[in-house]
Image (cartoon, helix red, strand yellow):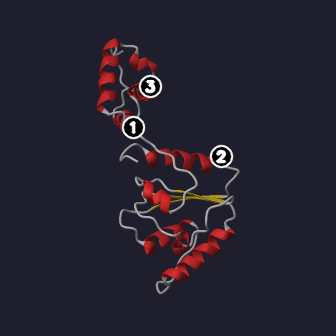
């Protein structure tokens, strides 16, 4: 998967919807890995999210057993491990193997990570076609901004400059308060 296409942004939206609306899962847990996978840090981050703390002298296997026990008590949960660059066995961290009551989502740039971790499904997020990029941009800025032919030309240029990358389009919109700008005479 490409960099900057909005994998994390998409998952943030899914995470927020699950937190607001899910009756399927009792818990939604979000942690961020890093380019250099640090098992101890990942275990501690997950533990904090499930309300667990470790002793400083606990080794990797003890932490994994405690996490597994905590997960099994949580019943139905979704675990998002964002920005994962390196595959790892679930049991090393203490994550139960995903099934009906446990879902693990891994946004990553690497299809190899997905395959090694035996994901059930891979969803590729890529850049948009020019028409899709323009449609997303129009959705974000609104019809009132695009009513002016002059502004529409500028908006099309901004959309093209974003290179059809969804995250860039949304970020461009968020950084420039076009909708709140008044172009008529002040009263």
Q: Are marks 2 and 1 in contact (CB under 8 Å)?
A: no
Closer-to-camera residue (122/183): 122
Q: Decide which of tag 2 and tag 1 comes sooner along the chain.
A: 2
- Specify whether 181 is left or right of 91: left
Which residue lies under the disc numbered 1? 127
Which residue is at 41% across, 33% downward? 128
The local secondary structure at tag 3 comes to helix
Relative placement, left or right, of 100 versus 65 is: right
**Pair 3/1: label in front:** 1
Which mark, residue 82? none
Residue 41: % across, % down: 43, 71
Label placed on residue 21: 2
Q: Residues within 10 Å of mark 1 (few under 14, many from 20)?
A: some
- In 3D space, how far apart are the residues under numbered discs 3 and 1 (Cα atoms)? 13 Å
Task: Locate residue 145: give its quadrant.
Answer: top left
Q: Which mark is residue 135?
A: 3
- Of the two numbered discs 3 and 1 on the same chain, state the one appearing first in sequence: 1
In the image, residue 14 sits, relative to residue 171, either above or below, namely: below
Task: Indicate the quadrant containing the C terminus: top left, top right, bottom left or bottom right.
Answer: top left
User: Which picture quadrant has residue 47?
Assistant: bottom right
In the image, residue 59 sits, relative to residue 21, either above or below, namely below
Residue 170 lies, with reference to residue 81, above or below; the image says above
Image check: 127 left or right of 62? Answer: left
């Amino acid at each position: 998967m490409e960099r900057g296409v909005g994998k994390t942004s998409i998952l943030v939206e899914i995470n927020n919807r699950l937190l607001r609306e899910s009756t399927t899962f009792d818990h939604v847990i979000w942690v961020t890995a890093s380019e250099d996978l640090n098992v101890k840090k990942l275990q501690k981050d997950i533990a904090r999210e499930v309300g667990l703390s470790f002793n400083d002298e606990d080794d990797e296997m003890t932490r994994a057993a405690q996490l597994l026990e905590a997960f099994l008590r949580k019943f139905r949960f979704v675990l998002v491990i964002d920005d994962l660059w390196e595959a790892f066995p679930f049991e090393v961290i203490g994550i139960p193997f995903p099934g009906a009551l446990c879902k693990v989502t891994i946004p990553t740039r690497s299809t190899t990570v997905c395959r090694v971790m035996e994901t059930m499904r891979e969803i590729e997020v890529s850049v948009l076609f020019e028409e899709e990029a323009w449609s997303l941009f129009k959705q974000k800025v609104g019809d009132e901004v695009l009513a002016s032919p002059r502004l529409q030309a500028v908006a099309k240029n901004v959309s093209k400059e974003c290179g059809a990358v969804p995250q860039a389009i949304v970020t461009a919109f968020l950084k420039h308060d076009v909708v709140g700008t008044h172009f008529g005479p002040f009263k």
